[in-house]
Amino acid sequence: MRFKTTGKRWGALTVAAMLAVSAGCSGAGESGNSHPPADAGQGASEAPSGGSAKSFELWLGWSATINNNSLIQKYWKEKEPGVEVKLEATQGDATTALNLRINTGGFKDAAIFSRSETVKSAMDRSKLLMPLEQYFTMPEKYPGLASIPKKYLDRMKDKDGHIWSIPTWFDQNPDDPWPGWSSVGWTVRSDLLEQAGMKAEDLATLEGVEAFLKKAAGLKDASGKPILPLSFLMDPNSTLGWSDENAVMSAFGVTTGGAGIEKKGGEFVFAYDDPNYKAAYHWLNRMYREKLVDPEVVTNKKEQYQEKNKAGRIAMNVGSFWNIPASAWETLDGPTEPGWYYQVIPFPKVPGVEKIGSNQVVNPYPGYDVYINKNTKNLEAILTFFDYTLQPKPEQQHVINEGPPGLYWNWTDGPLGKWKFTDEAYKKDRNSGDVAQKAKVTPELYMTSSFSGKWYPWWNTAEAEKKGAAKTVQFTEAIAKMGGVRNAHSQDLVQTKQGGVMEKYAPELENIRKEYRGKLLMAKDDAQFEAAWQAFRDALEKRGHWSEVKQEWRESYQADIQANGEF
């Protein structure tokens, strides 16, 4: 999803998730502008006032600036649902903080963490949790909890039928999921394409792309500096499931999204084993050797990469357009800066590749879990609050983030249409860019709710003051239709065996990927490339126990489809 403050994608996946469960907002990953949807024309209901009788502490499994006197929290307490929510954020690494907290007595009332097998395993071992399955079958008392799609809950049951968390941030319509912020693709500067005497149609093949890159190498930017033909961000925080190189992988038919596993010819092919994983890096290496890739691509920090784009130095980008960043065009009203000329193009056709590889899996399954301490004295407050956040209204995520319509925002053309902020003081703090000011108005807890393709707030805002802002939605809608995005299948939801080899070696597999991608890209000749590739394969096996990991995954997959069926 795209998060307004950071301009990201749906949920970035870890390699642990690559061979585990990667559930969340279909993207994820992409951080992205993941803001909550709004209240379908209900207005601010006068639910119980004086909610101080109900209160609980919610521990957030991520770093955040907290102001427990925020306007939205005040609304929750005084209006609906009549619950005081006291927030505490995690400091530093979430997993480390979780283990430390568990070893020192645990959290007081409730905790919400991004869904991961690491968290689930730690919570299970803690023996601190309350089983919750009964509360999902009480529609008279908790209609919001009872509205959670059964297929989500069924996958959460343990062998005894217990469910140990409240799932949140899922698609309300699992059979027709919202595609999310698709952002991984190929982006070209149309003005430089024109200067090269070419058209977008000329980039339909890899051969055409290479022809453009060679012509772009002879162009100069406004200051007289040579244009960098091709670039992308080799982010040190990326993963196999979220990496700019994945745009190239997709063109070569390699699936990196979801679990990084695709079924081909009746057999499961893991990304690292796909012959075209090597072919994709070999093509990038050839472009690098021919000086058609930014020579600093391996060492560029994110700020350097973005500055080169904003300054108009780069002709073509592969990867997520959030990394360019999107503000390069969103802040413009017309062709006054290079950013105006960015446009997305279809993945170029690669010889021998019949189908584009998936770089994003639209996963309607829950992205977050709320755990409740079995010793809490505030159970009713917790259940009341999450019953409220999980009302199955298309706009409910926006209501949770910004309050109900008529309070700080409202519809501009009717329910489930365009909207804008109506309270100028709220808007000023909300969009100030200062996290402390934003925290005064909202804790941004959209992830305690759910989402729907019927209405998504940051695709329907009337707040955009610049014409360029419309380009972002146009780009994401176009990329979603290019073939690199698919719905989740059974292989994307296989759970990691607690204490198994996947859990143990997934972090090392990710370390190996990052270590060798630069070596593959910068190899001086084919012989050095082959040596680097063989070293990569050896490291996967020796350090990452690759064969053992895959065997355990296959066993877990068989167990999963026996329990839940195959889809």
Image: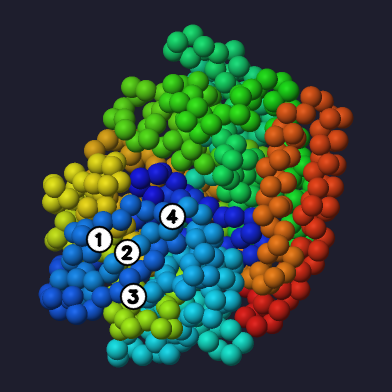
Q: Where is mark 1, residue-wise? A: 68
- Could you tell whether 118 is left or right of 49 in the image? right
Is residue 160 among what the camera can see?
A: yes
Q: Where is mark 3, residue-wise? A: 386
Between tags 3 and 2, which lies in front? 2
Do callouts 1 and 2 mark residues in contact (Cβ within 8 Å)? yes
Q: How busy is the neighbourhood of tag 2: few (under 14 within 10 Å), some, or many (20 plus)?
A: some
Identify the amino acid type marked 3: Phe
Quarter of the picture containing the C terminus is bottom right
Identify the amino acid type marked 2: Leu
Q: Where is mark 2, residue-wise? A: 87
Q: How busy is the neighbourhood of tag 4: few (under 14 within 10 Å), some, or many (20 plus)?
A: few
Residue found at the very far front of the displayed protein = 104
Between tags 4 and 2, which lies in front? 4
* Of pointers 3 and 4, the one earlier in the residue sequence: 4
Q: Of 389 and 267, which appears nearest the observer?
A: 389
Between tags 3 and 4, which lies in front? 4
Do callouts 4 and 2 mark residues in contact (Cβ within 8 Å)? no
Residues under labels 4 and 1: Cα distance?
17 Å
* Of pointers 3 and 2, the one earlier in the residue sequence: 2
Residue located at (57% from left, 29% from top): 300
Residue located at (57% from left, 21% from top): 228
- Could you tell whether 218 is left or right of 333 in the image? right
Do callouts 3 and 4 mark residues in contact (Cβ within 8 Å)? no
Is residue 419 among what the camera can see?
A: no
Q: Of 554 and 490, which appears nearest the observer?
A: 554
Q: Of 52 and 103, which appears nearest the observer?
A: 103
Residue 353 location (% of width, % of height): 73, 46
Which disc is residue 244 wearing?
A: none
Between tags 3 and 1, which lies in front? 1
Residue 186 location (% of width, % of height): 56, 37
Identify the amino acid type marked 4: Gln
